[in-house]
Image (cartoon, rainbow, N blue to C red):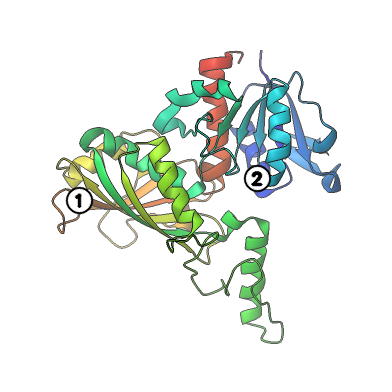
Amino acid sequence: MGYKVAVVGATGNVGREMLNILAERQFPVDEIVALASRKSLGTEISFGDTTLKTKDLDTFDFTGWDIALFAVGSEATKIYAPKAAAAGCVVIDNSSLYRYDPDVPLIVPEVNADAIHGYSKKNIIANPNCSTAQMVVALKPLHDRARIKRVVVSTYQSVSGAGKEGIDELWDQTKSIYNPTDDKPARKFTKQIAFNVIPHIDVFLEDGSTKEEWKMVAETKKILDPKIKVTATCVRVPVFVGHSEAINIEFEDHLDEAEARDILRESPGIMVIDKRENGGYVTPIECVGDYATFISRIRQDSTIDNGINLWCVSDNLRKGAALNAVQIAEVLGQRVLKKG
């Protein structure tokens, strides 16, 4: 016996990826529906070997459905997620709306799967920010061994994190570089993204940080440990898919780089590729389409007593969004609903 699953926002990049991953991982589905706004009504979407036609989210009745994977913005989620939850359908939400709600668990299955039981307060589970998700997968096993005091992270985030508009803008601006008569000014981003990097993601806050940076701090504390100090600099780079992060970690106890490498190799969801030679590391283009969080460049930081540096890369549309949501659904099914 399987589940009745709704994918909300099925025509977007993340919604399509959710459907792909549900099929790839053979999630036990008895019935599935692709939901979208009225303007996308009837759009055909692939689900494994079958084709689904989108239905109207506004008129959909969630009664009798088990799980709804939400891949729409916070404004739409604010309207439809409570309706689905009230109808008895467990919502797994990819927006930022519920991430900081103390009554809603924020889950990365490799890190804090036990928190899943907190869903019952609102019938909603939150999916973390894409940059946070891959980082905490890398931090968790090291934290268990040596207790992390402080994290300094610089991100190199792909344009797909800004949705289809971000992808289109990079593509159009790149083409326009070679055709000067076809100027493509910045619209989605604050400055030209083609052949450039932009140290600004989301809005600025009063302390000079951006909201994306604040998210990494707040979410790491909620998911992993409130005692960990985190400081982040988040940068948009001209890469289509795949977020990268340079992470500096300060521990309470000494952790040798060789032991750190061994720990990470044995940890769920992680693939270590760390050879000190040309090409002995992973870049974003190589992680696209993969489930793993890749770790490279593991080395001691000699400037502090107990420090490690590492390089972390992951497909942000997968682990950063769609895959993590499906993994949450798997944990929910295995530990709570127990139908599949």
- Residue linked to disc 1: 307
Q: Residues within 10 Å of mark 2 (few under 14, many from 20)?
A: some
Q: Earlier in the sequence, mark 2 or mark 1?
A: 2
Count of marks overlaid on the render: 2
* Mark 2 element type: helix
Label number found at residue 129: none
Measuring 60% from the left and 25% from the top, which residue is drawn there?
122
Measuring 61% from the left and 24% from the top, which residue is drawn there?
123
Q: Residues within 10 Å of mark 1 (few under 14, many from 20)?
A: many
Task: Give the vertical position of 43 relative to 156 (above or below).
Answer: above
> In this image, 262 relative to 55: left or right?
left
Residue at the extreme bottom: 181
- Residue linked to disc 2: 74
Q: Look at the image and tell me in which quarter the C terminus lies.
A: top right
- The amino acid type, in three-letter code, at marker 1 is Gly
Question: To which quarter of the image does residue 268 belong?
Answer: top left
Question: To which quarter of the image does residue 265 belong?
Answer: top left
- The x, y position of residue 242, in whole percent, is 50, 54
- Is label 2 or label 1 in front? 2
- The x, y position of residue 218, in whole percent, is 43, 45
Measuring 44% from the left and 64% from the top, which residue is drawn there?
208
- The amino acid type, in three-letter code, at marker 2 is Ser
- The x, y position of residue 252, in whole percent, is 18, 41
Whether residue 267 is visible: yes
* Mark 1 element type: strand
Measuring 63% from the left and 21% from the top, which residue is drawn there?
28
- Give the alpha-carbon distance from disc 2 to disc 1, as whole Å: 38 Å
- The x, y position of residue 71, in whole percent, is 66, 42
